[in-house]
Image (cartoon, rainbow, N blue to C red):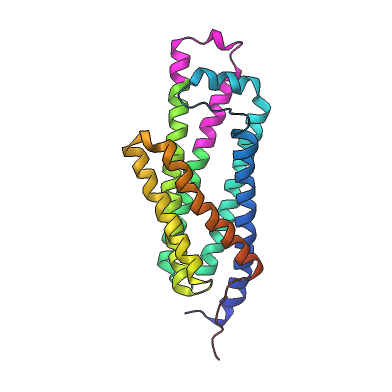
Amino acid sequence: MENQTSIPSQFKAARIAGLLYLVAMATGLFAEFYVHFPSALIISGDVAKTASNIMAKEQLYRIGIANNLITFTIDVVLIWTLYVLLKPVNRNLALLAVFFRLVETTIACIAIIISYVAMQFVSDADHLKAFDTNQIQALTILHDTYALSFVVVAIFLGSGSTIFNYLLFKSRYIPKALAAWGIFASLLLLMSQFAIIIFPDVEKIIIPACYGPIAIDEIALGFWLLIKGANIPEMKS
């Protein structure tokens, strides 16, 4: 399954992947619990209030944008390390997972651009009360597009993560129970996003339930790969 020359690269890729999983999780949690949640910048269904919050806390909003760009830059390197690690198991499936994850990252970056445009749009106004009907409508479209973008992002994340975890399960590089949990968490995230598209009213119920398992998976996988590495059998010469 592996050749001798690829094994050292796989060992290094596993350690780097573990580190990047943890760093990306840290930056993601920073955005969620320092920027978005405590400050409540984004108010679902209330575009005017959201615009007011952005105007009042523009620097914090900019920090959130920069943090997201860092997170998805890390993701690109993480995707590459997972490909290096899992290519000897099944090159075609590893490539498919890479394509899914790169589409995820591309859409996420487009969403970040949308959030930056929204900030520029708001900051150009002297006062929120100066917004006319067309401006409010434009903000509404930007806000809804941004929200939908991350639903689509999660679909491609779930698809790519399912394949990567399947390859980890098949390879036995990590404990099968950990890889199986990753498959479950990734599929749960994937299916839940389609449920949100079809039944938008369930979003507030589904979001905590679908992101919790995959967060646990990525943290556990990160620590395992960083500390234990990958159990790659050496071929006999």
The residue shown at (44%, 13%) is 134
Quarter in which the C terminus is drawn: bottom right
- Residue 152, located in which quarter of the rendered image? top left
The answer to if 230 sits in the magenta stretch is no
Question: Which of these two is toward me, 55 or 8?
Answer: 55
Question: Which of these two is toward me, 112 or 223?
Answer: 223
Report whether 92 appears left or right of 67: left
Magenta: main secondary structure equals: helix
Q: Is residue 89 visible?
A: no
Q: Position of residue 139 (x, y in %)?
A: 48, 21
Q: Is residue 4 above or below residue 18?
A: below
Q: Residue furthest left?
A: 198
Q: Is residue 33 visible?
A: yes
Q: Is residue 60 above or below residue 157?
A: above
The residue shown at (62%, 70%) is 229
Q: Position of residue 173 (x, y in %)?
A: 53, 73
Q: Is residue 182 above or below residue 7?
A: above
- Residue 149, located in which quarter of the rendered image? top left
Question: Which of these two is toward me, 165 or 83?
Answer: 165
Q: How many marks?
A: 0
Q: Position of residue 22 (x, y in %)?
A: 63, 55
Residue bounds of the magenta highlight:
111-138
The residue shown at (43%, 31%) is 145
The residue shown at (58%, 23%) is 120
Q: Residue furthest right?
A: 59
Q: Is residue 129 above or below residue 78?
A: above
Q: Residue furthest bottom?
A: 237
The answer to if 123 sits in the magenta stretch is yes
Report whether 94 appears left or right of 14: left
Q: Position of residue 168 (x, y in %)?
A: 48, 68
